[in-house]
Amino acid sequence: MEKDEFAAHPTKYWHALGDDRIQCDVCPRACKLRNGQRGLCFVRACEDDQIVLTTYGRSSGYCIDPVEKKPLNHFLPGTPVLSFGTAGCNLACKFCQNWDISKSRELDTLMDQATPYHIATAAKQLGCNSIAFTYNDPIVFMEYAIDTAVACEELGIKTIAVTAGYVCQEPRKEFYQYMDAANLDLKAFTERFYHKITGSHLQNILDTLTYIKHETNVWLELTNLVIPGENDDPKEIAQMSKWVMENLGPDVPLHFTAFHPDWKMMDTPATPPATLTLCRQIAMDSGLRYVYTGNVHDSTGGSTYCHACGKCIIERDWYNILSYHLTDNGCCSYCDAKCPGVFSGPPGAWGAKRKAVRLHKIQ
């Protein structure tokens, strides 16, 4: 592998301001940088009067996960996904559960190196049906993610973005041209939360959601991390569920997941399982058909039910599929109603396994 494959990588979403500063146009932060400075994400930097990506070709590590862990419950269920991220993030979430990666200021965090083609061929050799750009937000390493997605498509490997959705219009349009599925964090439904807890803005996220749903063919699922005292008010959950129903429709799966104390919110208690159950019920009462609980042991909240006949069509225990009642084309085997999602024949049998891999050992 040539050394220059991992040099600073040119980017195109930026413009000169005319005062010796360059503005990055990837996300709404619009960082204005002089030569030698880095954006808040830390990985996009101003060098030689242009914005470059400093983490192209380098990863914080690779792991094979069940696709349900992303979480995606309606996208190739039971199959393994090769997950990886880089370093840095364009949000400042105080509760970040991958803060050692997303908030890293040390490029030594990037322990593994691989070209996009190497990643795609490794996924194929490892028997993975898809690759997930995760751990930190793929928007900040979009050039690397897009090139990897192109290499994956040639080999029949699907690509998944796990993202907060904080991105500007033009890069968003390009990025999602190459994604097959996305799980987007709808972290709350108040501007107060987004501004105070994440350092971003709610409307930008809503714009990305409506764009993905109505302007792309990307399979979309949502995650809401329920944090006690911050975004768990039943009225807020009801307002969010109503917005999803009215703007995205009843068939977009919504995952309510449990918060565990981390990073700058160590004094906040973990989410009681009963709170997740209540959130799930509120969302279903709003008309959403596929609502799940996560990060807790709840077989009922983790299973999929036919919207037409009410029968359990994918029974799960954590990430293990216990029973499966969908036809090869994704219809309920009891009543033949279509279950929305991406299904391809029988489910996989990867289960709850998690396997770390080093790509430099895979030729």
Image (cartoon, rainbow, N blue to C red):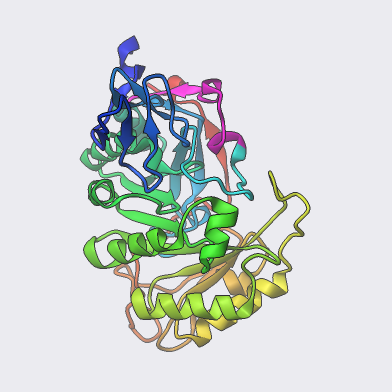
Query: In the rendered image, is residue 345 in sight?
Result: no
* Residue at 75%, 57% in the rendered image: 268
Task: Work out which residue is located at the far front of the displayed protein and give it.
Answer: 19
> Depth check: 224 or 48 in front?
48
* Chain part drawn in magenta: 100-115
Q: In the rendered picture of this protein, how many numbered marks are placed on residues? A: 0
> Depth check: 84 or 336 in front?
84
Is residue 15 a member of the stretch shown in magenta? no
* Residue at 23%, 47% in the rendered image: 174
Q: Position of residue 336 (x, y in %)?
A: 33, 83
* Residue at 57%, 46% in the rendered image: 353
Q: Position of residue 269 (x, y in %)?
A: 77, 59
> Considering only vertical position in the picture, is 118 above or below 123?
above
Q: Quadrant of the C terminus?
A: top left
Q: Is residue 125 left or right of residue 352?
A: left
Q: Quadrant of the N terminus?
A: top left
Q: Is residue 48 left or right of residue 189?
A: left
> Depth check: 225 or 322 in front?
225
Tell me the quarter of the picture where residue 3 sits.
top left
